[in-house]
Image: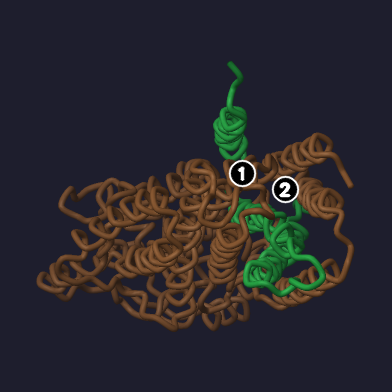
Chain colours: A brown, B green
Amino acid sequence: MLSANLSAIFYLISGVLFILALRGLSSPETSRQGNFFGILGMIIAITVTFLSIGNFSTGFVVVLIFLLIGGLIGAFIAYKIPMTAMPELVAGFHSLVGLAAVFVAIAAFLNPEAFNLGSPGNIKLGSLIEMSIGAAVGAITFSGSIIAFLKLQGIMSGSPITFKGQHPLNALILISIIVLTYLLCSTQSSNLFWILLAVSFLIGFLLIIPIGGADMPVVISMLNSYSGWAAAGIGFTLENTALIITGALVGSSGAILSYIMCKGMNRSFFNVILGGFGATEESSSSQNKEQRPVKSGNADDAAFLMKNASSVIIVPGYGMAVAQAQHALREMVDTLKKNDIKVSYAIHPVAGRMPGHMNVLLAEANVPYDEVFELEEINNDFANADVAFVIGANDVTNPIAKTDPQSPIYGMPVLDVEKCKSVLFVKRSLSPGYAGIDNDLFYKENTLMLFADAKKMTEDITKNL
Amino acid sequence: MEIDPFIFRLSIFILSIFIGYYVVWSVTPSLHTPLMSVTNAISSVIIVGAIIAGLAGNSDTIFSTSSIFGFLAISLAAINIFGGFLVTQRMLAMYKKKKKDK
C-alpha cells in the first residue's frame, strides 16, 4: 500500500505530464511526444490509485473487467471513426466524461466513507458542495453533449429550436440549481441530490437546443470546457491533485477555444449561447431577393483557368467535409503542382464544425501542414493570387462582412477571396449559407460558379487538367 | 492557526488555470482538433474516483449500489481514455511536412 503522501506526489507528476501533453501540441513535430506524455500520466494515475487502495481481491478483477470493456470499445471507435466524423466523436466523448463525473459523484454521495468524506447523511459540508458542483456540471455536460452529438449526426435538425419564454425558463432553472445545492447542503437529503441531478440534465438539454448547426464549433468548445470544470469539481471532492490540475487545464482550454471561435464569427459568447441565430435572418434575406446574373461554368473552364494560373489558393469549408472531397482535392492539387503552379490552402477559424476540423481533414488527405495557412497568415496573398478555389465554404468568404453594417455577419473576419484575379466557387446551388444571407461574391465579374457536388467537380477538373 | 488543506488545493487549481491559459494559447490552430480529443482523454483521469468507488466494498458488498456506479464510470472513462489517446495519435500521425525531395 502506498502512503498518502507518496501517492499525492505521483498524482502531481501525472498532472505535470498532462501539462506537457498539451504543451507538445504547440507544433506538429512535438505533438506525438506530447501525446505519449499524456498516456504516461494516465498510466501513472491509474496504477497509483490501485496501489494506494491496495485491494487486489475479487473487486479488483471486476474493476479490470470494466476497464477492459471500456478500453476495447474506445479503441475500436478510435480506429473505425472517419476523420469527417471527428466533431460527433468529440461531442460523444464529452458526454461520457460528463456522465462519468455524475456517476462518481453519485458513488461518493452514497458511500462517502470510501472517499473519506464522512458518513451518509453526514457528509462534510465542503465536500458536499464540491460534489454537487461536479455532479451538476457533469450532468449539464452530458445532456448538452448528447444534443450536440445528435445535431452533428443529423439525427436532430441543426436548426435552432426556440420557444417563447425560453430564456426566463432557463434562468429560472439555473437559479433553482443554486437553491437546490444550498438546500442539499443544509439538509443532506438524498432526494434533493436526485432532483438536483435531474434538473441539471434538463438545463443541459435546454441550453443547447436553441443553438444552430453552424455554431457547433463554439458549442463543442464550450462543452469541452464544462467537462473540465466537472472533473475539477470531482477533483476537489476526492482531494486529488491530478484531477484538479487536469480539470483546470481542460476547463481553460475549452474556454479559450470558445473565445477563438466566437472571435472568428465576430459574435459575443452570450449571443451564441442565447442561440436562435440563423433562424431570424432567413426571413429578411428572402424579401429582397432580386435575380442577379451569375456566370457559371463547367470543369473544363475551371481547369483552363487553373492551368494558366501561377498561384492558386484553396479555401475549404464544411461542404468539403460533407462531400468527402478532401482526397479528390489533394489529387487535383498534385496535378496542379506538377504544372509548376503554387498552391496553398486558406483556413478560416470557423471553417467546419469544430476548431481545426479542416486541418485534420487535409492532413488525412496527405496535404503537408506547411501548405496550410490560417486567415491572418494568408489573407494578404489573395491580392497576388490568380485563382481562388472555394470548395464548400460560403459565409467566410462573403465580402459583405466588410461593407454592410446591416448584415448579420458584419465585422466577422473573412477571407479576401474577391481580391483574387478570378474566383472559382464550387457549390451545389446559389442558396445562401448558414447565416441566411446572399454572398455578393457569386455575382462578381471575376467569379465563376461551378454548380456540382464538390467531390465530383474536383475529380472532373483533375481529368481536364 | 493551521491552513485548511482546501486552500492548497484551491491554489493548485487557480495556478493550473493560468498554466492552461498560456499553454493552450501556444497550441497551433491547426492542432485544435487533436487538442480537443487529448483534453477529452486526460479529463477522464476522473477514472481514479471511479476506481475508488468500485473497490470500496469488501467481498460481500462488491456490488453495492455505490460500487456499481463506480464500475459504470470506470467503463465510461476507459472508453474516453483509450478512444481519446488513440484517436489523437491517429490524427497526429497524419500531420506531415512537405517532402524536401523534388
Name the element at disc 1: loop
Name the residue at 25% across, 54% down: A400
Answer yes or no: is residue A366 visible: no
Viewed as shown, does residue A323 lie left or right of A275?
A: right
Q: Chain of mark 1?
A: B
Name the residue at 67% across, 64% down: B77
For the residue pair A190 and A297, the one nearer the viewer reads as A190
The picture places residue A55, in percent across and down from the top left corner, at 85, 59
Q: Which residue is situated farthest in the left direction here?
A: A287
Q: Which residue is mark 1?
A: B28
Indicate which disc residue A465 carries. Answer: none
Which amino acid, mark 2? Pro
Hey, which quadrant is residue A275 in on the image? bottom left
Name the residue at 58% across, 32% down: B6
Name the element at disc 2: helix
Q: Which residue is mark 2?
A: A28
Determine the CA span between mark 2 and mark 1. Answer: 8 Å
Assess disc 2: are there few (<14), some (14-19) or many (≥20) residues with their C-alpha within 10 Å of its C-alpha.
many
Answer yes or no: is residue A460 visible: yes
Viewed as shown, does residue B4 lie left or right of A136?
A: right
> Where A384 falls versus A227 (above or below)?
above
Which amino acid, mark 1? Thr
* Figure disc tally: 2
The picture places residue A214, in percent across and down from the top left corner, at 39, 65
For the residue pair A387 and B83, the one nearer the viewer reads as B83
For the residue pair A106 and A287, the one nearer the viewer reads as A106
Name the residue at 55% across, 35% down: B17
Please tell me if label 2 and label 1 are on a single chain: no
The picture places residue A5, in percent across and down from the top left corner, at 80, 34
Assess disc 1: are there few (<14), some (14-19) or many (≥20) residues with their C-alpha within 10 Å of its C-alpha.
some
Q: Are marks 2 and 1 in contact (CB under 8 Å)?
A: yes
